[in-house]
Amino acid sequence: MEFRQVEYFLAVVENDGINGAAAALGVAQPTVSQALRSLERELGVNLFHRIGRGMVLTAAGKSLIGPSRQILRDVNAVEELLSDSTDDVTGSLDLMVFPALATGPIVDLVARFRRAHPKSTVRFGDLRSEELAAGVIRDGHCEFVMAHLPLEDGVGLEVIELGEQEYWLVYPPGTDLPPGPVALTALPDIPMVFVPRGGGAMSDEIDYAMRRAGVRRPIAVLTEHREARLPMVLAGLGGSFVERSLAESAQDVAVVRACEPTFTRPFGLAFAPDSLSKAGRAFVDLVRSTKTQP
């Protein structure tokens, strides 16, 4: 297996096919196709399902993504070690961010990092499940994960806490709610869109608080897809608790209120300190310096 084959494989993954990969790499499409076929022959597995003109990763292809990204980071680390310049930070900073946190402090941190190190690049990936946060770091998919805390199975990882995220109430347009924070006992008697019990620390905390307060509202939808809560509310299915950043983004098209009591959950940046790239170490230094600023 050659480094170029790994690079081409990741380019196909990240650019949704051979055409996009060829354009991103500045090479001809047959060059990418040939490298990919050669890699599959060497490994003895198909990395993609060819469906018409489209390509979908196989299970083997998905399992190769993390190790391939780690290979690229390792090669970049060697190039940086042998480079004449010891000051410039190049290479790629690989982050995976839980969607509800993607519009918060991480955007400002990435912007500061790019201003300080313009020769670097940033890959801002989507962390679909916080339960997998530690695993995607250990499997090489990324160097950093931005997620709610505490991390499941986070032994051996270092965590920098960045703040707390508050959860607000969101209801369909036209819902009659008093101004200001709404007490649990004052929730309107309309159905709710909830995450199933056991589906997360915050959802369980809210469920427990409602039961303790003697508040029971009919359930419209139980969904394990947290990102579906707000669209379901906007579709009129019922009310829900969502991250404050999401709630505020919808306040022009939904009824949004803070809740009493307040529900908050800390979030932060997790990484393996012993295997950071030069870009990763620079990012950690920036994050820590930002936290110490008044």
Image (spheres, helix red, strand yellow):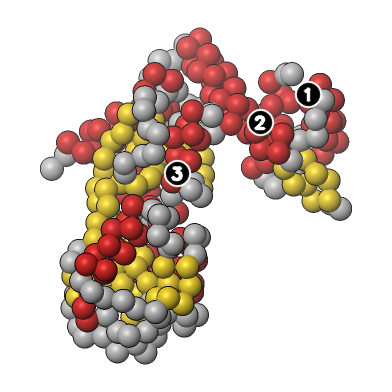
Which residue is under mark 2? 64
Badge 2 density bin: few <14, some 14–19, many ≥20, Cα 10 Å: some
Q: CA distance from mark 3 to mark 2?
A: 20 Å
Name the mark on residue 290: none
Residue 286, image x, y percentages: 30, 33
Contact, mark 1 vs mark 2 (Cβ under 8 Å)? yes
Residue 198: image quadrant is bottom left
Residue 176: image quadrant is bottom left
Identify the residue shown where x is 72% and y is 42%: 57
Q: Amino acid at mark 3?
A: Glu
- As rendered, which of 190 and 60 lies closer to the eye? 190
Position of the N terminus, as image quadrant, is: top right
Which residue is under mark 3? 131
Helix or strand or loop: what does disc 3 sit on? helix
Identify the residue shown where x is 23% and y is 33%: 289
Identify the residue shown where x is 33% and y is 58%: 204
Residue 79: image quadrant is top right
Q: Amino acid at mark 2?
A: Leu
